[in-house]
């Protein structure tokens, strides 16, 4: 797989492989979550709405343009507008992953989350793969009223947490976006395990030294 997902059939195979791997390992459940890649012609290849990431098929993916308009295939994920907003905001991004991973979703429901940065940099890998994590205010799934704020936030952050919902992460490749969202989920788990303890996160200097180069 090239860094830019130039080959559509390879991109389809990669989406299916990644979606199934995430689902089989419990990183999202039921028919939640959606994945996309940006193809070399600028169109987006996305999972379809209502599909389970555990059973997604190469021939059952949807295509939209960069505004999220449906081009072909089954009806795209209802979050297509969010994926498209990330691609418009981040020219270096060629993949977007959204999950309802349990611990990240739990953090998104906490009342005392810092909306500018929902998780502390507990580990080096979190600082390397995620960095800062703005919390976007609650909107119902598929509510494109979130689009302007999502696009604006994505200009400066490749990862966001949707309140009472779950994370969205863009990457230079689908492998990188999946790696980052797994790191986010594990750090959310650590954060919850450490509630009631006194964690010692990385210092701002230590975290800044590891900050990801933006895709
Ligand atoms: O996670 C989801 C909505 O936020 C799943 O929706 P879709 O089935 O439309 O992708
Ligand atoms: Zn969702």
Image: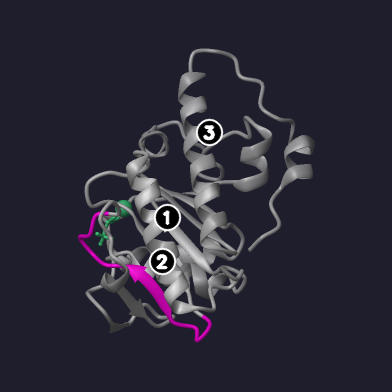
Q: Nearer the viewer, residue 63 or 121?
A: 63
Q: Residue at x 49, y 43 (%)?
A: 182
Q: Residue at x 26, y 79 (%)?
A: 73
Q: Answer above or below: position of 13 versus 122.
A: below
Residue 52, how many percent across, how many down? 24, 54
* N-term mark: 2 or 3: 2
* Residue 77 visible here: yes
**Prevalent SS, magenta region:** loop
Give the left or right position of residue 67, taking residue 141 as reference. Answer: right
Q: Quadrant of residue 110?
A: top left
Residue 115, how many percent across, how many down? 50, 43
Mark nearer the viewer, 2 or 3: 2
- Spatial separation of the CA atoms under disc 2 and disc 3: 29 Å
Q: Residue at x 54, y 48 (%)?
A: 179
Residue 206, how many percent across, how many down? 77, 35
Figure quarter occupied by ligand 1: bottom left
Q: Secondary structure at mark 1?
A: helix
What is the magenta range?
A: 40-52
| Mark 3 lies on residue | 187
Give the left or right position of residue 62, taking residue 212 as reference. Answer: left
Dot 1 crowding, Cα within 10 Å, few <14, some 14–19, many 20+: some
Mark nearer the viewer, 1 or 2: 2
| Mark 2 lies on residue | 13
- Spatial separation of the CA atoms under disc 1 and disc 3: 20 Å
| Mark 1 lies on residue | 18
Q: Secondary structure at mark 3?
A: helix
């Amino acid at each position: 797989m090239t860094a830019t997902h130039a080959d559509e059939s390879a991109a389809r195979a990669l989406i299916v492989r990644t979606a199934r791997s995430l689902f089989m390992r419990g990183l999202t459940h039921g028919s939640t979550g959606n994945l996309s890649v940006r193809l070399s012609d600028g169109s987006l290849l996305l999972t379809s709405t209502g599909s389970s990431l555990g059973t997604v098929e190469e021939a059952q993916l949807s295509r939209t343009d960069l505004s999220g308009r449906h081009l072909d295939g089954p009806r795209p994920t209802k979050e297509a507008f969010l994926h498209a907003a990330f691609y418009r905001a981040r020219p270096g991004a060629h993949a977007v992953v959204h999950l309802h991973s349990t611990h990240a979703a739990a953090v998104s429901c906490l009342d005392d989350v810092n909306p500018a940065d929902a998780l502390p940099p507990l580990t080096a890998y979190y600082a390397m793969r995620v960095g800062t994590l703005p919390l976007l205010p609650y909107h119902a799934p598929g509510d494109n009223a979130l689009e302007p704020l999502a696009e604006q936030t994505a200009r400066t952050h490749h990862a966001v947490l949707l309140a009472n919902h779950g994370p969205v992460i863009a990457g230079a490749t689908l492998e990188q976006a999946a790696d980052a969202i797994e790191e986010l989920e594990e750090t959310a788990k650590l954060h919850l395990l450490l509630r009631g303890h006194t964690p010692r996160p990385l210092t701002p200097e230590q975290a800044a030294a590891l900050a990801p180069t933006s895709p």
